[in-house]
Amino acid sequence: MARPDGRQPDQLRPVTLTRGWSTHPEGSVLVEFGATRVLCTASVTEGVPRWRRGSGLGWVTAEYAMLPRATNTRSDRESVKGRVGGRTHEISRLIGRSLRAAIDLKALGENSIVLDCDVLQADGGTRTAAITGAYVALHDAVSWLAARKALTGTPEKVMHRSVAAISVGVVAGEPRLDLCYDEDVAAEVDMNVVCTGAGDFVEVQGTGEAGVFARDQLDALLDLATVGCLDLAEAQRKALGSL
């Protein structure tokens, strides 16, 4: 069964990482996975939350949101509803955990960085695009701190590994990399995988949407995801050398 956009099963969508997309934040990246577009901004503040003061450790956290018309039909803003939805909480926490795996909080010193990931257009893989772009925005924010001699350690010590994320799934019995929306809603197995630039796993989220899946399917999906994340790590390296 052909993929909706004609890609091979192990092929990523076109990936673009545009640094400096927004003027004001200490780091900003527009990340595009095909038609999915997410704006990732990194905001630096001096000091850390009250519960962390005096520890010598910094803090990195994230917030995720989707614009009302990022999808085919308009959705209400969560601020108007008066509460943040469970899916939004889940994705925000995933992004925060993933980015903290890339950073040495002691070397960061008592500084805080907030990653805001706003989905401008959704076509599947918004959380994985957000993680991949937020890493680059975080890197630029750390460089901003380094230029002001505000770090406890060197920039290389602070950003001691890279992280990227990709979706994989089984669609029509076939393992596929980087699912677009049409594939995501039809997937028998759906998985999001976060990897370091060395191919180690940070987090794996997977479920059998239409039943159960076998160990060999799991292995095939993890193999696909690892290769995809390594390709994304290369795209991140190229983007960080672009300015």
Image (tube, rainbow, N blue to C red):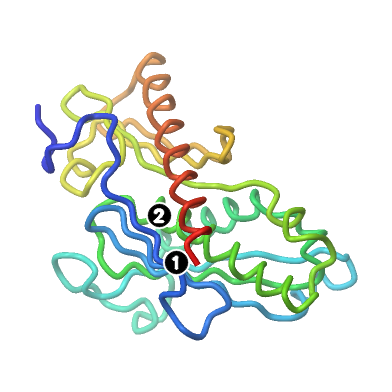
- Mark 1 residue element: strand
- 73 up-or-down from 204: above or below: below
Q: In the image, residue 105 lies at what x, y percent? A: 76, 59
Q: Residue at x 52, y 56 (%)?
A: 95
Q: Residue at x 26, y 42 (%)?
A: 179
Q: In the image, residue 158 lies at what x, y percent? A: 74, 57
The answer to whether 156 appears left or right of 30 in the picture is right
**Few, some or many residues within 10 Å of mark 1 (<14, 14–19, 20+):** many
- Mark 2 residue element: helix
Q: In the image, residue 156 lies at what x, y percent? A: 73, 54
The answer to whether 105 appears left or right of 169 in the picture is right
* Amino acid bearing label 1: Tyr
Discs 2, 1 touching: Cβ within 8 Å: yes
Q: Spatial distance from mark 2 to mark 1, Cα to Cα? A: 8 Å
Camera-side residue: 49 or 1? Answer: 1
* Amino acid bearing label 2: Arg
Residue on which disc 1 sits: 64
Camera-side residue: 123 or 236? Answer: 236
**Few, some or many residues within 10 Å of mark 2 (<14, 14–19, 20+):** many
Q: Residue at x 39, y 54 (%)?
A: 129
Count how many numbered circles sit on residues in the image: 2
Q: In the image, residue 205 lies at what x, y percent? A: 45, 39
Q: Which mark is residue 136?
A: none
Instruction: Give the position of the N terminus as an image quadrant.
Output: top left
Camera-side residue: 219 or 199? Answer: 199
Q: Which mark is residue 127?
A: 2
- Which of the 4 quarters of the picture holds residue 165? top left
- 195 up-or-down from 62: above or below: above
N-terminal of the pair, mark 2 or mark 1, is 1
